[in-house]
Image: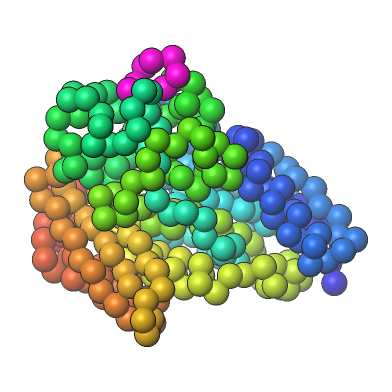
Amino acid sequence: MKSNVRIGTRGSKLALWQANHLADLLRQKHPGIEIELETIKTTGDRVLDRPLAEIGGKGLFVKEIEDALLSGRIDLAIHSLKDVPAELPPGLGLVTFLPREDPRDALCVRGRKNLAELPEGAHVGTSSLRRQVQLKRARPDLRISPLRGNVDTRLRKLDDGEYDAIILAAAGLKRLGLDGQIGELVSTETMIPAVGQGILAIEARLEDMETRHLLGPLNDSEASKAARCERALLAGMGGSCWLPMGAHARQAAGGLLLTAFVSSIDGSCFLRHDATGTDPVHLGTETAEWLIGNGGRQLLKDIQDRHGN
C-alpha cells in the first residue's frame, strides 16, 4: 500500500483547513502514512477585481491544481464541491466525498440579526448570481454589490463598513470556527444553495488505484448521493456559470428529494422544481430536463447569444 501522499491545495485559510482535515482523516485510517501539502495559487485567487463569471467561472479555482494532478506533481486534491465545474479533464475524477456540512447560506450583518431586519435599501455584498437573484426575490429593496476575496477579507470589508451585510457559505464559517459571525442561517426555501455547497470532494487520477484505495474508507454515502444528483443537474443544464442556478438534494422517504432553480440574470424569469427519486443521477438529469423544457432552454439561449457562444 502507498506510504506517502501529496495533497494539492489552495493557500487560503479555509483551503488549508480542508487539506489538513483530509490529512488527519487519512492518518486515522492509515497510521504511519506520510503526507505532504503543496500550496498552489489558482487564477481565481489572483484575479479579485472582477466577478467569476466574467473571467471564466468557478473552474478558475481548480485548473492549476488539476494540472498538477495530471502531471503527477500531486496525488490528490481536496475542493469545496461548489467550486468544481461540471466537466473534469479526462483522466481525473471526484473519487471521494466527505460528510456534508451545513449547506445553507449565512447572512453576516453589522448591527442587525437577520434578513427581515435589514433596513430598507441596505447594502449587501455578494458576487454570486445565484445569491443576488434570490436576495432580490426576498428583499427587492436591497442594494447588492460584488464582493470577492477569502473569508477573512470579506468579513473585514463588512467590519470596515463597506457593506451592511454580506452572504457567505455557512460551511466555511463553521469549519473556521467563525459561527459567531453568523447573523442568520438563511432557510433553503429562501436561498437554494449552490450545487455541492457544504460538501468536500477529493479529486484524483482515475488510474491511480493505490491512492483511490487509501481514500475509499473516507467516502460518505449520503454526501456522495447528494453530490452525484446535484452535479447531474448541473451537467444537464450545460454547466453555465453565467446562469443563476442552485440545487439541494437531501434524504427523503424512499430516496432523495431534489429542489432546484434556474433564473434569468435579472430574476424576471425564475423556474423552480421539486422532485423525488431513488437514482441520484437520474433524478438530477430528469430535473434538468424539466427546467429546460419549462423555460430554461430560452434562458440558456439568451445567455449564449449574449456571450457569443
Q: Nearer the viewer, residue 309 or 39?
A: 39
Task: Decide: is 6 above or below 1.
Answer: above
Asked if one can make out residue 270 in the rendered structure from this viewpoint, the answer is: yes
**Horizontal relation, residue 143 to residue 112: left or right:** left
- Identify which residue is drawn at 9% across, 45% down: 268
**Horizontal relation, residue 162 to residue 199: left or right:** left
Q: Which residues are magenta?
A: 158-165
Residue 202 in the image, given as x and y percentages of width and height = 61, 59
- Identify which residue is drawn at 60% across, 66% down: 96
Q: Is residue 32 magenta?
A: no
Asked if one can make out residue 208 in the rendered structure from this viewpoint, the answer is: no
Residue 188 in the image, given as x and y percentages of width and height = 31, 54
- Identify which residue is drawn at 60% across, 40% down: 176
Q: Nearer the viewer, residue 168 or 195?
A: 168
- Identify which residue is drawn at 56% across, 59% down: 201
Q: Is residue 160 magenta?
A: yes
Residue 301 in the image, given as x and y percentages of width and height = 15, 54
Q: Quadrant of residue 216?
A: bottom right
Q: Main secondary structure of the magenta part?
A: loop
Point out the image quarter for the N terminus: bottom right
